Image (tube, coloured by chain):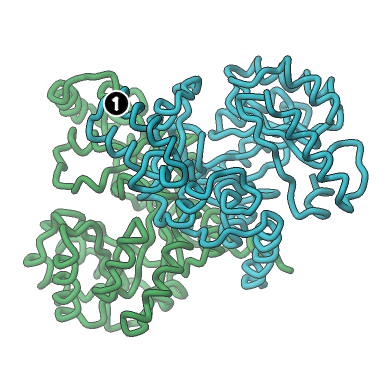
Chain colours: A green, B cyan
Amino acid sequence: LDIFLRHTGGIGFIGAGTDVSELESHLQKATTLLNSTSLPTSSTLPIGIGFINWGASLGATDPLIQQYRPSAVWFFAPRSLAALQTWTTETRNASPGTKIWVQIGSVEEAINTLTIGPDVLVVQGTDAGGHGRTRGAGIVPLFPEVHDAVHTRGSEHGGKVPILLAAGGIVESRTAASALVLGASGVVLGTRLLASHEANISAGYQNTILNTFDGGQTTVRTKVYDELRGTTGWAETHNARGVINKSYTDWEQGMELEENKALYEKEMKKGDEGWGVGARMTTYAGSGVGLIKTVMPAGEIVKSVREGVGKVLSRFNL
Amino acid sequence: LDIFLRHTGGIGFIGAGTDVSELESHLQKATTLLNSTSLPTSSTLPIGIGFINWGASLGATDPLIQQYRPSAVWFFAPRSLAALQTWTTETRNASPGTKIWVQIGSVEEAINTLTIGPDVLVVQGTDAGGHGRTRGAGIVPLFPEVHDAVHTRGSEHGGKVPILLAAGGIVESRTAASALVLGASGVVLGTRLLASHEANISAGYQNTILNTFDGGQTTVRTKVYDELRGTTGWAETHNARGVINKSYTDWEQGMELEENKALYEKEMKKGDEGWGVGARMTTYAGSGVGLIKTVMPAGEIVKSVREGVGKVLSRFNL
């Protein structure tokens, strides 16, 4: 981890999600791009892959991990701890150098996950955009409680304590610095990178990120967007945070799902105009969305957050 | 503010809430206690009073503020900005030295509140226990966005920028330090002080605070507890976070409110056994409840948090 933080200022993840059918072409593209950089050669590809385990095919993934040897895999929302164990074992067999990151959203989930021996736990607070636990806490109380529980229980698992990262509401340097003060070894940027040049999203989506403020009031955790999009394989324990739009307010006012879905599918044909508060396309975003004002290259975002953290913390030199 | 932070390590508030009928006896008691301390004499009483403005009577409060001159009043959840303006004007007339604190939970509410010229804004994140905004963000994204908005808009109100404090999920030194890093001038402890010797709550309530962990999963924001208790004057915009207990799970499973209320009223006669996960008495608590392990004197809690903040931040000396 530290190698990549030092050389590139961060590590990026290809989001395979529930569908690995395009993963190989993304990995080929990443390999080509990475070969053209001055990064030091390494036994692993300096990029990670993110999986939503309940939907992704381990059978299709395994040969790709063996061939491309990503530096890290990010596991999230398995159907069971046994399934997570299988993914972990198979990944370690296919590529021993690949680090296992697991995203969790509660103290109980963190403790249970220790049994599979993760290298990194990503502690996701409820401010995060997109999918996460339906119930949750912000990282301010969640992270320290997970930290203490993991360090206490770590000794029961051969003393191995994973690296702990914080996610959820972290979009700029103050928010990142606060996570480090809570005890995090590093932070995760999600929504902030939607407003990067490299983000593979429509201009309509990106403009909505820039134009949304006061995220605690203008985003909401809900299963409605999954229902409209047909991504209904998520467990009851999980929903997703998105910008409140017409789909949501219509649902809130009692519109039948079938009608709402038909309107959603019509909206899909509108292009960029389908996004926005008065439109219907799903705009997953965290509640820190209001702090995002400009689209920047991803590398500049990571660099400015890292440099800003030093400035924020230097105010407290004692 | 600073005087009290330096001499006592914090400032305490008498919670008048919606009912000021016992406020005078509390103020008399506080005056007696404060006269027996070595605090420097001051033109105001070194204590604050907290009001839930939609329910409290300004007519009954005004003479008490004039007579006892509290250092601060804490305003929360007025029916309108006009009502908040009236409370502010009347308080300043009755006791010019009394500082006006207003608790807000969104960027919009913060900006609107600037028009009444508060001395302090308490920025309440959604991790807070008890009442707050139904929708919200944790302080990690909320505080910096409020901070920036208030500093930008402050110039439109004669350049007066209120002191900003953070509330919600702050229970020990790491959480307090993170709030300072976010830009807060100070922090508010609520749930943590329920586990103090001085807290005016039953042992059943206090034990539930000590025995509840993983607060993101074991507490919930809801209006159910208000309905059971008959405290139904709150606006639609507000609900309250409490420990999930039998009242809540029965409601979730469809029990009629009347039946639930009858069971609640029966439970009230059980004393300390009426509290707990398997019981029915409302246990308002924030999602940082899992970090609270011991009952301590309130002064020791404040002191240990303050001293701990220094230690946490000294790890980052650059």
Badge 1: how crowded within 10 Å, few (<14), some, or many (20+)?
few
| B63 or A75: nearer the viewer | B63
Residue placed farthest to the left in the image? A59
Say which residue label 1 marks. B259
Q: Residue at x 65, y 60 (%)?
A: B305
| B219 or A30: nearer the viewer | B219
Decide if residue B161 is in sight here. Answer: no
Task: Describe residue A317's horizontal placement relative to residue A66 as left or right.
Answer: right
Residue B87: x, y in percent? 71, 20
Name which quarter of the figure residue B124 lies in.
Answer: top right
Relative to B82, is A63 above or below? below
| A191 or B4: nearer the viewer | B4
Q: Residue at x 45, y 60 (%)?
A: A143
User: Which chain's residue wears label 1?
Assistant: B
Relative to A43, is A283 above or below? above
Give the quarter of the figure containing the C terminus of chain B.
bottom right
Residue A43: x, y in percent? 27, 83
Look at the numbered disc 1 and give the secondary structure of its residue: helix
Residue B95: x, y in percent? 85, 26
Type of amino acid at the residue the image marks with label 1 = Glu
Residue B17: x, y in percent? 62, 29
Name which quarter of the figure residue B302 lies in.
Answer: bottom right
Q: Residue at x 24, y 19 (%)?
A: A254
Task: Describe residue A25's horizontal placement relative to residue A216 as left or right.
Answer: left
Give the quarter of the figure containing the N terminus of chain B.
top right
